[in-house]
Amino acid sequence: MKKILMLLFVLIGAVTQAQPKVPSDYFRNPLEVDLVLSGTFGELRSNHFHSGLDIKTLHQEGLNVLASSGGYVSRIEIQHFGYGKALYIQHPNGYTTVYGHLKKFSPEIDAYIKKQQYAKETYEIELFPEAGVLKMEKGELVAFSGNTGGSGGPHLHFEIRDGQQRPMNPRLFGIEIKDTQAPAINSLFAYTLGEDSNVNGSAQQQRIRLFPLADGSFKTEPINACGNIGFGISTTDKQDGASNNNGVYKIETSLNGDPVFELNFDRFSFAESRHLNQLIDYKYFSKNKSRITKLFLQPNNPLSVYNNVVNEGKLNIRDSLTYLYNIKVLDFEGNQRIIRIQIKGKQNNNIIPKEIKKTDYFAQADQAFSVEENGIDAYIPKGSLYEDTFLDISFTGDTIHFHEDDTPIQTNITLGFDVSKYRPEDREKMFIARLGYQGRPNYNTTYKKGGRFTTSIRTFGDYTLAADIKPPSITPVNFQNKQWISGNSDLKLRISDDISGIKSYRATVNGKFILMEYESKNNTLTHDFKDGVVTETENNLKVIVTDNVGNSTTYEAVFFRK
């Protein structure tokens, strides 16, 4: 009897660990339509996990966004990129809900924001209202869905965060999404994880062929291996009503029936999100744009999304023994796919070695690294790299080829350029750029001090000195100089900059600041006449736009309104 009770306690503990205990009926659907997803919680994105649900909004903007539960608006952030227009509601039970990429806010909230924006004369703003200022009831209108910030199309980004501001999977709280489809398995890879390890006679990463079975699962041909090995998988999931390839909820592995590894997306912290690059095969992603999830741990991986990991998820395959390794991929509704892999332990004395490109530059992960040549220097702090790496570095004129973007960087690396050979007036228009597609220079935030420029980077690649002597352009969109525009609801201009990019803008009418919303996706500035600032019949508009090196353009026009 004692053994049965002990087992019961263990099972209860395991379940509690797997899914945090949270209220299941506290939060409601933040929209008035059935929830269909274009992105899931924990989905693998560039340098981060997706921290919420991306909810489709019928391919349009302007749907009512409702408070998922009662509370008060604790934070408002408006930025050109990121979440665009975002609202945070603090709830009495300690959780926070987040609503991102909004088109506009409810009238009460909008009036509060506009007052602060005009007082500070800025569009981008972050506000923290006191608890009693903007109270919200469950189901109350708080905003309208949109496509602002870094959104790739109209949708609502919705999050639930715990008391430590860690994003949690909204599905845990009873947010229902119809999903009757099992995850898709796209590819399977095997890795050798020891000096004498091999898979099918090779130490190199290998793609393993998958054979679909009638029950929806997969099997592979028997694999010959020996030593420590691991596997990686490319997998996605679809929910009903959408064709998007989204992220999965959980992956479990077992060896001869014993659990080896579990990955699940219930909760994570923003501080660890960039370590996603240790979860995926970053080198493979950089070349193939497909994310392989590694089902084993490598050094310097602090992620908290793992459970029940034995021997770091690595398989110790011994000569002459046979093994059955299973991979189970699940979505939140429990739909699953299984891969069954037969492994035969077989020692091989003629192993095809790994391909390691050795160079003159070797950086150790636990030590700082620096290099300098041609007036260009680079400094990699201790811990910025995950593992010891041979770096491919070369210098040509004002350009450094600083390795390839197939090695992840965790913390900032500093690049410095000696620009003392250039005239001070020329330096004003110069900046450090990362060379992108077809050698196009992309502005990197450049710090200038005398004859030295520096920048911080988190991506390897080619960096150089570039110059921008061309000022931004400003073009009216829905009006012309000296035109009557009484019928217009807004004032719209298009702005752009060829090289270094837009840094700031400011608009006035008759000498008074007017708020203009910048939408980087279509390069427009828009002023809403409902702000009530423009009250005269004859109005003198002045718009000043400045790029990242200080080039400035001023546009002036007169318009008339009744």
Image (cartoon, rainbow, N blue to C red):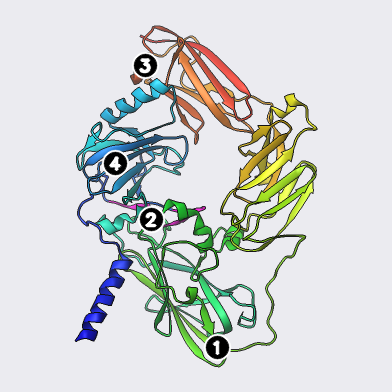
Lower position in the chain sequence, tag 1 or tag 2: 2
The residue range painted magenta reads 35-49
Of tags 3 and 1, which is closer to the observer?
1
Q: CA distance from mark 3 to mark 1?
A: 80 Å
Lower position in the chain sequence, tag 4 or tag 3: 4
Lower position in the chain sequence, tag 3 or tag 1: 1
Residue under pointer 4: 89
Asked whether disc 2 touches disc 3, contact meaning CB atoms under 8 Å apart, the reply is no
| Residue at 68%, 87% in the rendered image | 349
Of tags 4 and 3, which is closer to the observer?
4
Up the image or down, 165 lies above or below 112; here it is below
For the residue pair 513 and 457, the one nearer the viewer reads as 457
Asked whether disc 2 touches disc 4, contact meaning CB atoms under 8 Å apart, the reply is no
Percent position of residue 64, x then y: 27, 38
Q: CA distance from mark 4 to mark 3?
A: 37 Å
| Residue at 56%, 54% in the rendered image | 410
Q: Tag 4: residue type? A: Ile
Residue under pointer 2: 40
Question: What SS does tag 4 mark?
Answer: strand
Does residue 176 appear in the picture of this structure? no
Q: Tag 3: residue type? A: Gly
- 358 relative position to 314: left or right: right
Does residue 420 appear in the picture of this structure? yes
Q: Which mark is residue 166?
A: none
Q: Which mark is residue 487?
A: 3
Of tags 2 and 3, which is closer to the observer?
2
